[in-house]
Amino acid sequence: MHITPTAIPDVLLIAPRVFGDARGFFYESFNQQAFDEATGTRHQFVQDNHSRSSRGVLRGLHYQLPPHAQGKLVRVVRGRVWDVAVDIRQGSPTFGRWVGEELSEDNQRQLWIPPGLAHGFLVLSDSADFLYKTTAYYQPQAERCIAWNDAQLAIRWPEGITPLLSAKDAQGLSLARAELSPSPPGRGQG
C-alpha cells in the first residue's frame, strides 16, 4: 500500500497495491498489521458499515463525542464520491481545517480519518456504494452533526450538484455552536 499524508497530517490517503489483468483485479482491501505499520497507530476496528446513495446525496458532517469517537477507514466499491474530513479537535494545530479527496471504484483509494474528526461525503455518480470500518460502535447519544455548508469551514464541494440531505443532516450546527472533541491524543494512541 502507498500512504499519502494530507493537509491534516493524521488523515491519510491510502492506495492499495492492485493486481489486474484481462480477467479483472485483486487487491487486499485491509490488513491490520500493514495498516498499523503504515499509519503508526494501533486501532482495532469493531464495526463495518455499507451505504448506498444516489447522485447528489450528501451525508455528514458526522462525528461521535468521546469516549465513543470513531476512527473511520472509508472507501467506495461502486461509483464516485467527494469525501471530506474536518479537524474538530480543540487545540489541534489543524483545528477547523478540512481535506477532500475523490474516492471511486476506479481509483480504489481509501481515506483514514482518525477519531475526533467530522466526516461527510457527496455522491458524484448516479449512485455509490460506500464502505467504512469504524474503531467504535455507533452510539446515537454521542452522535453529532456539523452543517455541510458552514461558512467558517468553507468546504469547497464540487459544483453543479444540489445536495440532498436527510432531515437530521439538514439540522447540522455551525462549527461555532457544535459540541466538539478535546485535543488530539498523541499519535499512535486511540
Image (spheres, rainbow, N blue to C red):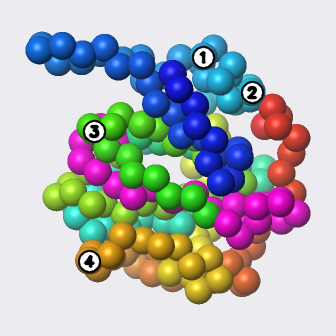
Residue 3 versus residue 63: which sits nearer the camera? 3
Residue type marked 3: Glu
Q: CA distance from mark 3 to mark 4?
A: 21 Å
- The percent coordinates of residue 104 (x first, y second) are 31, 44
Which residues fall within the magenta stretch? 76-97
10 Å neighbourhood of mark 1: few (<14), some, or many (≥20)?
A: few
The residue singled out by tag 3 in the image is: 105
Q: How many marks?
A: 4
The residue singled out by tag 1 in the image is: 34
Q: Is residue 45 magenta?
A: no
10 Å neighbourhood of mark 3: few (<14), some, or many (≥20)?
A: some
The residue singled out by tag 4 in the image is: 160
Q: CA distance from mark 2 to mark 1?
A: 10 Å
Residue type marked 2: Gly
Mark 1 and mark 2 in contact (Cβ < 8 Å)?
A: no
Q: Relative to 27, is 1 on the left or the right?
A: right
The residue singled out by tag 2 in the image is: 40
- The percent coordinates of residue 56 (x first, y second) are 27, 69
SS label for mark 2: loop
Q: Earlier in the sequence, mark 3 or mark 1?
A: 1
